[in-house]
Image (cartoon, coloured by chain):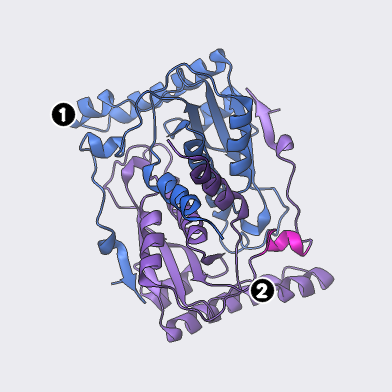
Chain colours: A blue, B purple
Amino acid sequence: MLNDSEREGIFKAIFERRDIRSFNGKPISKDKLNNILMAGHHAPSVGFMQPWDFIVIDSQGVKERLAHACHKEIQALSIHYEDEKKTRFLSLKLEGIREAPITICITCDPTRGGGHVIGRNSIPETDILSVACCIQNMWLASYAEGIAMGWVSFYKKTDVREILNIPPHIDPIALISLGYTDFYPTKPILEQVNWERRRNLNNLIHHNAWE
Amino acid sequence: MLNDSEREGIFKAIFERRDIRSFNGKPISKDKLNNILMAGHHAPSVGFMQPWDFIVIDSQGVKERLAHACHKEIQALSIHYEDEKKTRFLSLKLEGIREAPITICITCDPTRGGGHVIGRNSIPETDILSVACCIQNMWLASYAEGIAMGWVSFYKKTDVREILNIPPHIDPIALISLGYTDFYPTKPILEQVNWERRRNLNNLIHHNAWE
């Protein structure tokens, strides 16, 4: 059983965790990094397949190449927005790979655990869903450690595979930047800039069937 | 900033959370259920699209139909295992839908937020990854509330869509059972029965490139 403060900590992390793209230069200790990786590794996974790997990147050269790949993709995406929305999109800070002391590429190995993984046999994408649970654990553990985290999904997978020498059957699910920040916002960035708003939970709840 | 006990609570939840398939009959209060749903709704989502819906099932008739759909799938999957492994597979308790006071079908609406969701434009499956983060938040919130949770992924999506009247473009990502349990194990069930073991984290960490 948890005491009240332990329970409170869990809900604080869940409600106050934010996606951060601005980091100051302060380095992350090995202990904290290890706690965050260990938290990811203790995520649930379908058939206990643990399909994740963690490529921990602290080389500035590799970070530059990843940031370049992201910026190519952001430029390409901006083509699809028109006029004011395009300007607003390009004005958003969408990644902090260069500044963050550490970026981690989290991958999914769909072959891990062999051909007949329990549960994945029915719903194959449960492997990447397991990796997402791993990432969410890392996010909450980062919050617990006072460290900011940002999930970047602006890249072509082929670029990230090439930069990080990832085999073709391995799926680079996310680039996660970790570091300290001078400003940890109370609301999601996209809500703050009026890009999207939080939906009313009551409208998302159905009873016994889709309504 | 968190105090030590709040920090501890977060790591306890992450490390001690288990996937549960056995429930006693004790009901869940509305407050606790609401806290768990609210925790899910505060997950990160790509472009803040919040693609999830929650179908909360307490009707015994609907639960029976879902459990039947799962058991059909489990029987079908067992055909792929041979001899002793087949016997072991069929001896596992793979779902607790009938006993759990509440089962929630968590869905993903890939159309939510319109055609050009930030981030999802590059990696379309980030919508279902967001739903997985939502599920992991619910798992940790359940742990905080002293409630056991089990993720069932043994079903044909078409069966679940039909039983719950889910529109064809909506993806039923998971069936989540919630309730109280008399036995909350310290290790994952599949580890306890020697089906799989936890991997060594050190073997999953790479430095600056896939090794």
Q: Amino acid at mark 2?
A: Lys
Name the quarter where the N terminus of chain B is drawn. top left
Local crowd at mark 2 within 10 Å, few (<14), some, or many (≥20)? few
Instruction: Please name the amino acid that badge 1 sits on.
Output: Glu
The answer, for residue B129, to whether it is visible in the render is no
| As drawn, B101 above or below B32 | below
Query: How far across and how far down the image is residue B109, in percent?
Result: 35, 57
Residue B6 located left or right of residue A39: left
Would residue A197 be found to the left or right of residue A37 on screen? left
Indicate the secondary structure of the residue bearing disc 2.
Answer: loop
- Tally of numbered discs: 2
Q: Residue at x 75, y 56 (%)?
A: B196
Residue A15 position in % (x across, y down): 37, 47
Q: Residue at x 41, y 83 (%)?
A: B59
Residue at point 31% right, 66% down?
A: A205
Residue A194: which disc? none
Q: Tell me which segment is drawn in magenta.
A: B185-193
Closer to the camera, B36 or B71? B36
- The Cα–Cα distance between marks 2 and 1, rounded to whole angstroms, is 55 Å
Judged from the image, the secondary structure of the residue bearing numbered disc 1 is helix
Answer with left or right where residue A92 lies relative to residue B89.
left
Badge 1: residue crowd in 10 Å (few <14, some 14–19, many ≥20): few
Q: Circle 1 sits on which residue? A: A84
Q: Which residue is mark 2?
A: B93
Residue B112 against residue A118 in the figure, above or below: above
Is A92 inside the magenta-drawn segment?
A: no
Q: Chain of mark 2?
A: B
Q: Position of residue B80 (x, y in %)?
A: 72, 68
Q: Is residue A96 left or right of residue A34?
A: left
Say if the magenta span includes residue B189. Answer: yes
